[in-house]
Amino acid sequence: MKKTVIINLLLALIVFSSCQMKDTAQEIINKTIKSIDTIENIYYKQDMLRTNPRQVNDTIFRYREMYFKRLVQDSIVGVKGHWYFNSDDKNQVNFEDIYDGNRLIRKNNRDSTVMLYDFIKFPEFKQKHFWSHNTLYGMQYEFKYILDNLDSYKIERLKDTIFMGRNCFQIEVLLEDKMTMPGFATILEDNEGSVSRTLFIIAKQTYYPIRMKGEFYSAKNPEQKFFIDQTYYDIKFNIEIDEQIQFNTSDESISGYQITERKP
């Protein structure tokens, strides 16, 4: 009896694995889009490396923790969010971004200052982007946009890999002679000679991205490349979030800070 059960399990695993191997890049992206639809809120940590735009030979390191909750009606980032921007040793929170759909507060905990963006008073802010594809719904929107514009994008499934101990798909997205900014108002613009190559590492178990690596350069100067490399870990889906704490942008929450209200 035990042998029969084991054999059946092995057969099921073989069938499951063979089905996954047949999945095309487009099918994997579609499954990732559907997977994100099951997520109402999320917590994760993010390590980021990227080119310093002011000095291209330097690399910037950032360590963050994030809470997000779905906010479908929002046209900018699709979430309520709280970002913790940690120090290099990860022992202090230097900056925080908190957005509840109506206000964005950017706290500098090192000098007790706050930049306040009021989206009700100044709805023009809804036309500007912040956080971009760093949010799960921003990535989902980007994936949908890619699939709707396959005449411009090239997508390819690369060899599967193991990343952070997890079996993963690798999907490469190539965009040439055009440029765009991921977000909820993405527009492709002609930009002759530009090359954007992005690798998404997607966990097979959850169909959720756990790493994104991008490089950007001009065909006229391919040696000078800009890059971004983001890893997502300690991911927790659909957890209990106290919104009064995580997404609190009230005046009381920034009492004692020197506040500067930004205008469009």
Image (cartoon, rainbow, N blue to C red):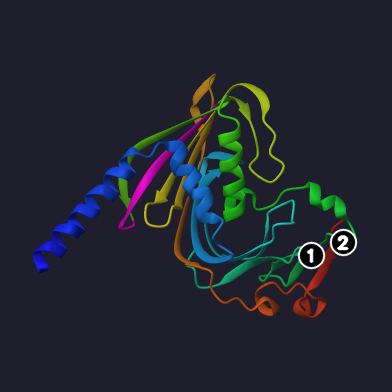
Residue 120's mark?
Answer: 2
Q: Say what secondary structure mark 1 lies in.
A: strand
61 lies above or below 194: below
Determine if residue 86 is in view. no
The image position of residue 17, as x and y in percent, is 27, 48
Specify the principal SS of the magenta part.
strand
The answer to whether residue 245 is left or right of residue 22 is right
Magenta extent: 164-175
Q: Is residue 171 magenta?
A: yes
Pointer 1: residues within 10 angstroms few (<14), some, or many (20+)? many
Q: Tell which of 14 and 81 is nearer to you.
A: 14
Q: CA distance from mark 1 to mark 2?
A: 8 Å
The image position of residue 21, as x and y in percent, is 31, 41
Task: Identify which residue is drawn at 56% across, 56% down.
Answer: 37
Q: In the rendered structure, are the residues bearing label 1 and label 2 in contact, judged by CB atoms less than 8 Å apart?
A: yes
Task: Identify which residue is drawn at 86% across, 50% down.
Answer: 124
Q: Quadrant of the N terminus?
A: bottom left
Does label 1 or label 2 sit earlier along the sequence? 1
Residue 103's mark?
Answer: 1
Q: Is residue 223 magenta?
A: no
203 lies above or below 51: below
Residue 137's mark?
Answer: none
